[in-house]
Amino acid sequence: MATLRSVTIAHTGRGNAGHSLHLAFAQHPDVRMVALADPDPAGRAKLGGECGASTTYADYREMLAKEKPDIVVIGQHWYDDARVEAFVAAAESGAKGIFCEKPVAAWPYQADLMLAAVERRQIPVVMAHRSREHPTMRRIKHRAAAGEWGPLVQAKAHGKGDSRTGAIDTLVLGTHELDAMLFMIESEPVSCWGTVTVNGRPASRADAKTSDMYGAGMLAGDRLFAQYLFAGGVIGTYESLPVGDGSYSGEWLGLDLYYQNALVTTRGRPGGQFHVYPRGGLFAHEYFPKWARIPSEDWVPDPPVWDPSDAGFKAWRGTPTAFSNHRIGEELVRCIREGRRPVQASGIHDAVKVLELIVAPQRSHLEGRRIALPLKERGNPWIA
């Protein structure tokens, strides 16, 4: 019998329930989704029916007060101040844990409010970043720590490169890869240099427009490039630029790890394609070593086969994203019971650092200088 009661805060038309976060606990034996809030009547009925919520609400505040949940899922893929208010309300409701759609927020000042709310109550938060929950990512990190490939020299992250290139791509998709970068490097980022362009020229505040896609406010840029210096000397880079016709951009989204004696690529998560090239640099030559695939046996099923009838997958619709949500949800339950921060999932402290890596290159570009991390200025740099 389920011992933990969960609820979902969604908003159809303003981020919905994110990447099906309302189904994250559908197959967890100890968690029952008892209620869902969505101000949109049609969306409320649809999402509530999908997750099996016995009660639905138009107002999440009423839901929190009446249901007194153990777990709150912040499903909205929308990043305005109203979402921050919903998160803070969840933290103040007496909940034992929160599962939050990525990124944590659009701007650091918002994330600061969210972090303060959960720190006051020592509530664990897991984020829907697709990185730390994947066993192959952890296995790669273990092999690297054992010295198999030599020291890590550089980490290169790529956005998805579809129609959202630039600031939006970085905010909603680059967030996965920047979290993976932090996970793999482990040391703290200390500075950032960034460049943002619009139609081939440097972006200015005059180019900034209110985004109508994710509620993030004023943004500019259709290309974004960033360089990060980490304590210990590792260099991290991130770029968001167009990739082909966009049809295979999901395979471009990823993190490449340049060790002294090997190149390891991690692409296309949450399912994932992982490969190693056994040299310190990549050269096209028929006599050089070939790429080797790093298997992911315990991520069921092994890509590229996604058969909904496979054991272990049919219960959650056979999609890697749903399976990822399930794993992250499992980690939240462990955190609640063991009284600790997330390890096999990204937590809110990680997410705040990731958000700084997203915003820092934009501020660096506008100020024309390298920016120290953590960021001192916590607002939207596109607003003077």
Image: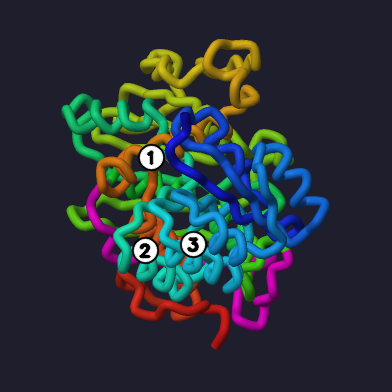
CA neighbours of label 2 inside 10 A, class few (<14), some (14 to 19), many (20+): many
Task: Identify which residue, 61 or 161, lies in the foreground.
Answer: 61
State whether residue 327 appears in this view.
yes
Which residue type carries mark 1? Val
Where does residue 132 sit, x and y in percent of width and height?
38, 38
Q: Quadrant of residue 338?
A: top left
Range drawn in magenta: 186-212
Which residue type carries mark 2? Val
CA neighbours of label 3 inside 10 A, class few (<14), some (14 to 19), many (20+): many
State whether residue 202 appears in this view.
no
Q: Secondary structure at mark 1?
A: helix
Q: Residue at x 46, y 46 (%)?
A: 177
**Residue labelled with disc 2:** 118
**Residue labelled with disc 1:** 333
Q: Quadrant of residue 21?
A: top right
**Residue labelled with disc 3:** 90
Q: Which label sits in the foreground, 3 or 2?
A: 3
Which residue type carries mark 3? Ala
Please state if 130 lies on the left or on the right of 117 as rendered. Answer: right
Of the image marks 3 and 2, the number of the one nearer the N terminus: 3
In the image, residue 208 lies in the stretch drawn in magenta: yes
